[in-house]
Amino acid sequence: MTSKFSSRVRSLVPLLLATASLYGCGAADDGADRLIVIKFPHVVAPSTPKGQAAARFEQLVEERFPGRVDVEIYPSSQLMNDDDSLEALAFGEVQMIAVSLSKFDRLTHSFQVFDLPFLFSDLEAVQRFQRSETGQEMLGELVDSGFLGLGYWHNGMKHFGAPVPMRDPSDADGLKFRIMESDVLQAQVIAVGGNPQKMSFGEVYQALQTGAIDAQENTWSNIYSTKFHEVQPYFTITNHGYVGYLVAVNPTFWAGLPDDIRVGLEEIMDDVTDWENSRAAEINADNLERIRESGRTEIVSLTAEELDSWRTAMRPVWQQFEANIGVDIIAAAQSAN
Ligand code: LMR
């Protein structure tokens, strides 16, 4: 099924074309002969949902535009961390990013909805919200800040890893938690008595190993591919939050592309987005099994009652961020469940 993402993006393009010519970027046909290089850095392993989708995008683009478009993928924080990539996109040092929605926190408050604890029941619910009118509008929300959203890619639902089995919120008391750069996640950890530390993804393994942090939250694919399970004795299945990405380009760069290339890249992106989103849950489930089979850590499952106590402890975070995010956005997200 082709997603609706492209229609939203395409409706912005005439406006962007005007902006591109203002910035002297060249009208659509001027650069028809030049090799277009798309540098696409990201921070996770090639085996993760995002890593696989980025590689597929590269392959499909180069098959369709041989000698005209060169996509260069830099996985595993090889080139830069996510924070730096937000700036690099604005300065044209890289041309495409897929950064966690949580990390757009300083640019927009509405994306904070994706971090509200226990808001979405599963990835299908997130997807319904992302495909809703509200979700589609949010794709274009950061254009003025220099980010044109081409689509949302899932990773998966988050779980806690810790030095102790986390059955009750009181087990988090006093633990140092690594979190992504998000104020909602900071409030979430404080709500259960933990000590939140914002840290880039590439630093987490070592911080766990040296004891600079005690605990963290992430998806099974990020945990498995980065071997967090080898340095964390317990993981608790909570599904308390979501990790997903805004795939974004610089609007001026995008509008300056030759028409046939821009349209072709948007078509490929739509296909890759559908492909990625239909596989993410499966990759995470597979990676959970591999973690279990490794015997390097213990996986804790909670009863419905235990899970409820986490939900209750974290719920005040919603009220804290309601005004920032907007009640309409939260209601639209809830109705996707
Ligand atoms: C994290 O920092 O934990 C994630 O954003 C990494 C990723 O890109 O999935």
Image (spheres, rainbow, N blue to C red):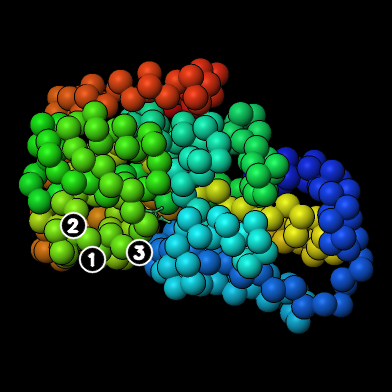
The residue shown at (8%, 44%) is: 165
Residue 212, given in percent of the width and then of the height, sits at: 18, 57
Gap between marks 2 and 3, in whole Å? 14 Å
Residue 188, given in percent of the width and then of the height, sits at: 29, 33
Left or right: where does residue 183 sit relative to residue 291? right
Looking at the image, do the residues carrying marks 2 and 1 touch, with CB atoms under 8 Å apart?
A: yes
N-terminal of the pair, mark 2 or mark 1, is 1
The residue shown at (52%, 32%) is: 109
Counting other residues with Cα less than 10 Å from the Cα at mark 2, is it few (<14), some (14-19), or many (20 or more)?
Answer: some
Element marked by disc 3 = helix
The residue shown at (34%, 38%) is: 185
Kind of residue indicated by mark 3: Gly
Image quarter (top left, top right, bottom left or bottom right) of the C terminus: top left
Q: Quadrant of residue 58?
A: bottom right
N-terminal of the pair, mark 2 or mark 3, is 3
Gap between marks 2 and 1, in whole Å? 8 Å
Gap between marks 1 and 3, in whole Å? 9 Å
